[in-house]
Amino acid sequence: MIFPIFFTFALLLSSSLASVQDFCVANYKAPEGPAGYACKKPAKVTVDDFVYSGLGIAGNTTNIIKAAVTPAFAAQFPGVNGLGISLARLDLDAGGVIPFHTHPGASEVLLVAQGTIIAGFVSSANTVYLKTLKKGDIMVFPQGLLHFQVNGDKTPSLAYVSFSSPSPGLQILDFALFQNDLPTELIAQTTFLDVAQIKKLKGVLGGTN
Amino acid sequence: MIFPIFFTFALLLSSSLASVQDFCVANYKAPEGPAGYACKKPAKVTVDDFVYSGLGIAGNTTNIIKAAVTPAFAAQFPGVNGLGISLARLDLDAGGVIPFHTHPGASEVLLVAQGTIIAGFVSSANTVYLKTLKKGDIMVFPQGLLHFQVNGDKTPSLAYVSFSSPSPGLQILDFALFQNDLPTELIAQTTFLDVAQIKKLKGVLGGTN
Amino acid sequence: MIFPIFFTFALLLSSSLASVQDFCVANYKAPEGPAGYACKKPAKVTVDDFVYSGLGIAGNTTNIIKAAVTPAFAAQFPGVNGLGISLARLDLDAGGVIPFHTHPGASEVLLVAQGTIIAGFVSSANTVYLKTLKKGDIMVFPQGLLHFQVNGDKTPSLAYVSFSSPSPGLQILDFALFQNDLPTELIAQTTFLDVAQIKKLKGVLGGTN
Amino acid sequence: MIFPIFFTFALLLSSSLASVQDFCVANYKAPEGPAGYACKKPAKVTVDDFVYSGLGIAGNTTNIIKAAVTPAFAAQFPGVNGLGISLARLDLDAGGVIPFHTHPGASEVLLVAQGTIIAGFVSSANTVYLKTLKKGDIMVFPQGLLHFQVNGDKTPSLAYVSFSSPSPGLQILDFALFQNDLPTELIAQTTFLDVAQIKKLKGVLGGTN
Amino acid sequence: MIFPIFFTFALLLSSSLASVQDFCVANYKAPEGPAGYACKKPAKVTVDDFVYSGLGIAGNTTNIIKAAVTPAFAAQFPGVNGLGISLARLDLDAGGVIPFHTHPGASEVLLVAQGTIIAGFVSSANTVYLKTLKKGDIMVFPQGLLHFQVNGDKTPSLAYVSFSSPSPGLQILDFALFQNDLPTELIAQTTFLDVAQIKKLKGVLGGTN
Amino acid sequence: MIFPIFFTFALLLSSSLASVQDFCVANYKAPEGPAGYACKKPAKVTVDDFVYSGLGIAGNTTNIIKAAVTPAFAAQFPGVNGLGISLARLDLDAGGVIPFHTHPGASEVLLVAQGTIIAGFVSSANTVYLKTLKKGDIMVFPQGLLHFQVNGDKTPSLAYVSFSSPSPGLQILDFALFQNDLPTELIAQTTFLDVAQIKKLKGVLGGTN
């Protein structure tokens, strides 16, 4: 009767591998490190740590840009922590715009799920790569480069974006320049923008100084 | 008149950065290396290298698994070469199945775009993480672990999968075991499957020996 | 008399480098992160953290596969934590088998220390790479691909395997499929195996449902 | 007389290590890959491949920004290819400005060698980190974030910047927006800038459309 | 009046990105991991975490080597933690020497800021790369290779070194061999040095046994 | 009759994955890159690229150190190229010594296969980690640190070493110092060794100047 012996073998193996790092589900309570969040103990991990439903809900686009970004980064989706990938949902109403922005730590691939999207990025050599994307098209935006998405149509667009990092970051140009206390004079010096233009956008976005 | 001077400055900078590696669009003619394909010369790169339309077309599901996988890996989509990310499209007809498989070099995030999908993976500790996903749900499959997707419904399902590598690989369990010349005797020894079962599946899948 | 001055210099340097990360010996009590275990304080590290004797003892092969795997991964051998390498010992009795398996996060090099071993792996293109290895031969199994080892001889074999990760993981195909609660119906759908075959192996391996 | 024997041993070792990758000096004639330039044959490498004198010469600051950037990236300095590091020299005349920019693929550390520099960066959370740096101060700018440097003094400043990549890239905001053919209308939509402002800066920087 | 709506949008985004890993400022109190120190909470980070003034002060060179190394590694400069870069300052008095040493985990680029420096490294093939560097010259020392710096002049030299790691380590050959309790007999066997020579240097450097 | 349809599906998949990077067997004729050798075309790869028999032959220990190192690095063993791992064989006759050395680009794990070995390494903090290893013991030497192995017994020892890189490099201290044209005066300055001692070892090892 071989069963008992076999189980010994099997159990021995499993236990010796108890903490193998197949995955590292984010434990938001422990301190973060350079590589991401600490790991939940495997025994406490459930399938729901690997599933996220937040991208199934349309973002609220009743705002000035007629658009919404719904992230599923490691901060929202614990299962991707440490795995080098994450997603987000883009809703663009008619005329909606995701303004010029960068992801400091990741490359992005955009997939048009509905409608059309005018997308572009600019390289370090200042070349523009611009395309109008139809449903089903995908476009890649290399790491750290300025890019944008616009819905030029009369109907809403939906896109899903994938990132090569669980925490890609998102730096929106206008927020970075006009939604904080960076002195207007410094912005003018470092962007060549007119002071009046800067003050106007600070007014809209709530920047000070 | 400052313009000329300024251009000098600008050009000097651009030229000195001419070959900065913002991206490395795949040049399929040069030899590959461990990090991916060689790079096209920046001057020959166009926006179409960064856009791929192949995922807009439904795969042909009139086959034994009633499913199709359409990859947009570096081998099909030159723009993702070297960028740590790629995508694919999954079409599952009613009852369609993406059989047990692994991606040797990447983690995967699946997004259900239409219908429902029963998805699961198994960890090194042999724990099963199983979930029925609705439209808009996403699920992550950690790198290298066995996983599958099934359409348990009466209507077709569509999903898009993202990978943490431009060349994630795809090893389908049944193909690996039964669609080559691996001797039946060795398969029996290393899988505990009955010889009759192996011969039957080799027959279906075209394996020899 | 220069000594005092010199010591000042020396001590200054040493202290300023007190926590340089030459190594990160696993501290099993602190929370794990995506890059591995937390580090023991250098002052508490001893040479025994860098030495492991567990591979000197033959594994118990009196089991159904007539084989044993003895790991020296970061979970057993704290000194390799964070260093991108680990080892294990394989004991194969006459006719012993390490069944089809993968290491989700690492490549492997096998060294035959005693006897002969029939080893093989299958690529994503379903090509089989199969070889009978003699004492002193080494064979590499690229990351994440299905592979196996068999002792076809009448005498025991011994092998040492090295991995390109301190936590390579080990997913044994039969355990993943038949040693948990994955429903038989789903296994049948996703492997094309007959229900009778699945139930038989679940019986042997202790799977349920 | 042991010498011959010893040499046998030594030569055997050296030859067997002939192509060990201690370094990979850039061969600008062979195709580039995602990890950098191809390697010069070790036999053709000289110490001058590891030394660069271009940073010893002050850049020409008689331009609109009263500043100059002199890079020593892999494209100029073959010895750093593949080594994860590069340098550049910044010359800022009185009132000189390095406008808002990012390095898509690298973190930067700036060292003030002469004069004072007002430096700042903005995080993804739109927080500004701003400081006036004195001679000898260093400041780090995390990867991919918008940052700038200004010489607020009456005398020239000199700084050296180090990067965590041999090809960090350099995307200057104004050049990316106003020095190419990106349509004014699209820029207005994606930056909220007034059309008049955009046209004015395109005029200065030579942008079209 | 669109402002309120707009703020909703802005705040929503910011909060959802609250813990994006733009940076990971070292928290010296939490346990270290293989990738570096744990991260300070973003709310507690200030610009002073990203600025370090310690390199503005000349090191004390009144010692046996007439030289000093002042590090700005992650252990001294919290802002570089996790960012793949760090700096140090070298002061060499007339005739000063930074003895043969390695950085186990990083490549180095040296910049001569004042005076001249004779620098060299040795490759795995035992080739010497030696150069006398003038002010403004830079030289790269590939990861892990033995190298040294000497001031052959009558006047002091100053250099700044950059590393491709926040914790490059520093192993000074003489300290490694002669400033600890490694038995003289073993040193003799493993270096071919005469016992008298070893005892003499142990005497100078404070080694025992 | 489903076979044809099924094959369509199967072939489609295989072809689309034709150049997936499961592995990158070294092509020694194409130019090397920072990540390793270029890849052989998959169609030309055979199982013998993944198998190496050179470690089955004892090295010639009739030399001054009574020891031999037989590498199986990417330069000798094409199958490990790009896979982050390699091996070597150490033969130590009675009294044999592998002198102080480093591996610039890799951590090492040593396995004693026969006899006993006295092994040690020194950390950046100049701490010695020294142990006498018995058959079956393993010891890890963290990346880039000075270490050695000695056979203190009357009988030969055999060890196998694994590295966390396919091209770990090997810098033997005595060769680096005394087997090239580095001027004796510079060696004396940078090692504190007596000129007579240096000249003596240069004589034995064939160094000049």
Image (cartoon, coloured by chain):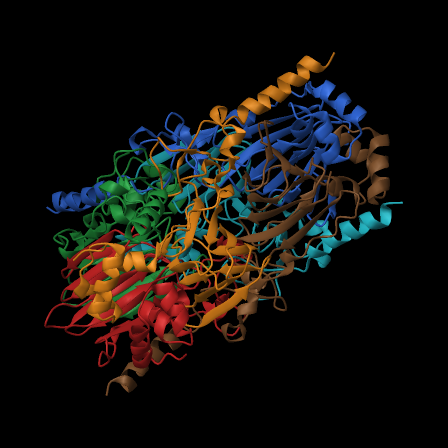
Chain colours: A red, B green, C cyan, D orange, E brown, F blue
Taking E137 as reference, is B100 above or below it?
below
User: In the rendered image, which quarter contains the C terminus of chain A?
Assistant: bottom left
Which of the pair E129/D116 is nearer the observer?
D116
Q: Position of residue D93 (x, y in %)?
A: 46, 55
Count of residue discs: 0
**In the image, F165: left or right of F157?**
left
Task: Give the camera-side residue of A102 and D49.
Answer: D49
Which residue is at the far bottom?
E1
| Residue C25 horizontal side relative to residue C136, left or right | right
Can residue E24 be seen? yes
Residue ranking furthest to the front: B1
Image location (x, y in percent) of residue C153: 49, 32
Left or right of D179 in this view: D163? right
Q: Position of residue B119 (x, y in %)?
A: 29, 63
Q: Is residue C59 above or below residue A103?
A: above
- Please identify the quarter of the rendering in which residue C190 is found: bottom left
Between F21 and B18, the one nearer to me in the picture: B18
Q: Nearer the viewer, residue E118 or A115?
A: E118
Q: Position of residue B153 (x, y in %)?
A: 18, 68
Could one spot residue C156 in this view of the protein?
A: no
Residue pushed farthest right? C1
